[in-house]
């Protein structure tokens, strides 16, 4: 039923965009694209989106994803906070990155595609940072464009408050976009946890937020609604890709992801500052890659198929994988717990296989072992998705609007055994590692 629903939605999207007056570009006229992640996230989330663009003829050398340093927003935008960034800081990072992309590609303008907080960063750059002269298209998925709430009593001074000076100036004027730049927003119908009239996901259940389901929409933009998708799927789902590709190029995408026989994987190991991921390269991180059995997670051959200790740039690759093979990535970063990340097979290569050491959750310090299933590009929907962890429905995942991107099972320290995580069409075998961190990371 899920697959049928997706086909229906995809067909509907193609019909909608066929009726839109979007002039088609020739492939050699497509603008370079810069993808901008959201709060606390990393450039690695754009992996599957970039795969889809490449599979539809986009030059890999014209697809860029910025890794914003200290990606978590400050509690109060104007007050410095260790390990967190202000709206001004991330805007300046984006400005410098766009200038570098224009220099590398020789283009005069780029398209910007952002998710969640990335919408704030993009809008700030286009309106206040000189970006209007350098940007042709803007696509904002799940943008917190009117805040996650409107209040004079809560989140005071936060960029996520619709009553903040930052948000008011972004939305000032007859339109909420910038003249000369094509804007499109993508939102869910009712499934975006940060566009809810009730404050449940803000720790204020039963209290009105002042924001509705249409909070991500902007006056003056092309505003698209994709039914049932969650906050992150507004950018990282196949449906969001279809809308984004059509808006930027004027053409219908013809493929999903095409397979490469020998995917070449690379990326950066990044670390943690003040308890938050900082997207800063880690020097001296040891990365071992093991090929594992697709059913048991057992290491094949006993030895890593690839090993490297990072330098100052944090780069851990390149590693040439086998198409269809399952791998375990082991990260030993200074001062962090040893982390085992089990991944679905890689169907294409990428320079955006970014690795982060895991963190031991509060309360799990004395646990024998813990296995976590993680979905960076979306949330788990109890009423929507097929999923299980160690043969059972994952504990801690809320019903209703998808609101959790991780779930875990706590196990004894011994014996070490196979723990299988399932989400939709992906099945990932893992092992529990006492005193260390185990993560089953889904691709989609």
Image (spheres, grey):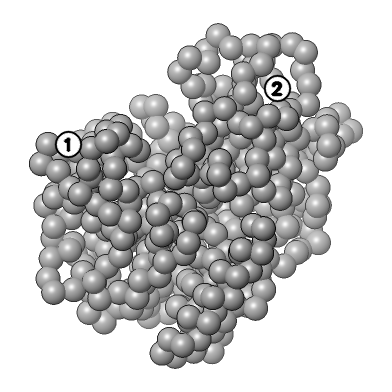
Residue at image mark 1: 154
Residue at the top extreme of this rendering: 366
Residue at the right extreme of this rendering: 301
Give the class, few, some or many, for how many residues have Cα within 10 Å of label 2's Cα (few <14, many ≥20).
many
Residue at image mark 2: 432
Nearer to us in this view, 147 or 16: 16
Q: In x, y percent, where is residue 286?
A: 64, 31
Q: In x, y percent, where is residue 12?
A: 54, 75
Nearer to us in this view, 428 or 14: 14
Label 1 element class: loop
Left or right: 323 in relation to 192: right
Label 2 element class: loop
Q: Quadrant of residue 3?
A: bottom right
Let me know if residue 317 appears in the view: no
Left or right: 282 in relation to 302: left
Residue drawn at point x = 30 percent, y = 74 percent:
221
Let me know if residue 219 appears in the view: yes
Residue drawn at point x = 23 percent, y = 45 percent:
209
Of callouts 2 and 1, the N-terminal one: 1
Q: In x, y percent, where is residue 70?
A: 36, 41
Residue drawn at point x = 27 percent, y = 63 percent:
123
Looking at the image, residue 305 lies above or below residue 194: above
Query: Label 2, label 1: how many angstroms apart (C-alpha)?
Result: 41 Å
Foreground mark, 2 or 1, reads 1
């Amino acid at each position: 039923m899920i697959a049928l629903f997706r086909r229906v939605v995809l067909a509907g999207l193609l019909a909608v965009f066929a009726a839109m007056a979007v002039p088609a570009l020739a492939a050699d006229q497509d603008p370079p694209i810069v993808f901008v992640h959201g709060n606390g996230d990393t450039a690695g989330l754009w992996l599957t989106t970039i795969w889809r663009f490449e599979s539809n003829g986009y030059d890999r050398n014209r697809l860029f994803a910025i890794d914003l340093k200290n990606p978590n927003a400050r509690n109060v935008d104007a007050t410095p906070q260790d390990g967190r960034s202000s709206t001004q800081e991330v805007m300046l990072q984006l400005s410098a990155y766009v200038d570098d992309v224009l220099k590398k590609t020789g283009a005069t303008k780029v398209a910007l595609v952002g998710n969640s907080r990335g919408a704030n960063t993009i809008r700030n750059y286009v309106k206040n940072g000189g970006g209007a002269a350098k940007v042709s298209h803007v696509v904002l998925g799940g943008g917190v464009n009117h805040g996650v709430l409107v209040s004079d009593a809560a989140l005071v001074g936060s960029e996520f408050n619709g009553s903040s000076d930052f948000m008011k100036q972004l939305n000032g004027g007859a339109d909420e976009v910038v003249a000369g730049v094509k804007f499109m927003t993508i939102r869910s119908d009712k499934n975006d946890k940060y566009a809810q009239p009730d404050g449940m996901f803000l720790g204020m259940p039963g209290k009105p937020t002042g924001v509705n389901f249409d909070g991500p929409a902007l006056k003056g933009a092309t505003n698209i609604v994709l039914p049932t998708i969650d906050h992150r799927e507004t950018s990282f789902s196949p449906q969001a890709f279809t809308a984004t590709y059509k808006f930027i190029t004027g053409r219908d995408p013809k493929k999903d992801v095409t397979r490469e026989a020998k995917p070449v994987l690379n990326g950066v190991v990044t670390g943690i500052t003040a308890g938050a991921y900082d997207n800063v390269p880690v020097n001296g991180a040891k990365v071992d890659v093991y090929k594992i059995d697709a059913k048991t997670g057992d290491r094949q051959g006993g030895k890593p198929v690839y090993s490297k200790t990072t330098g100052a740039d944090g780069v851990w690759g390149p590693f040439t994988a086998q198409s269809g093979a399952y791998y375990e990535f082991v990260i030993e970063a200074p001062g962090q717990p040893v982390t085992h990340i089990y991944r679905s097979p890689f169907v294409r290569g990428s320079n955006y296989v970014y690795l982060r050491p895991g963190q031991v959750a509060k309360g799990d310090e004395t646990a024998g072992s813990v296995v976590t299933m993680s979905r960076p590009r979306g949330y788990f929907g109890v009423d929507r998705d097929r999923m299980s962890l160690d043969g059972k429905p994952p504990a801690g995942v809320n019903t209703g609007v998808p609101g959790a991107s991780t779930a875990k099972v706590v196990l004894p320290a011994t014996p070490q055994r196979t723990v299988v995580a399932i989400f939709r069409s992906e099945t990932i075998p893992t092992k529990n590692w006492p005193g260390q961190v185990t993560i089953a990371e889904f691709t989609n």
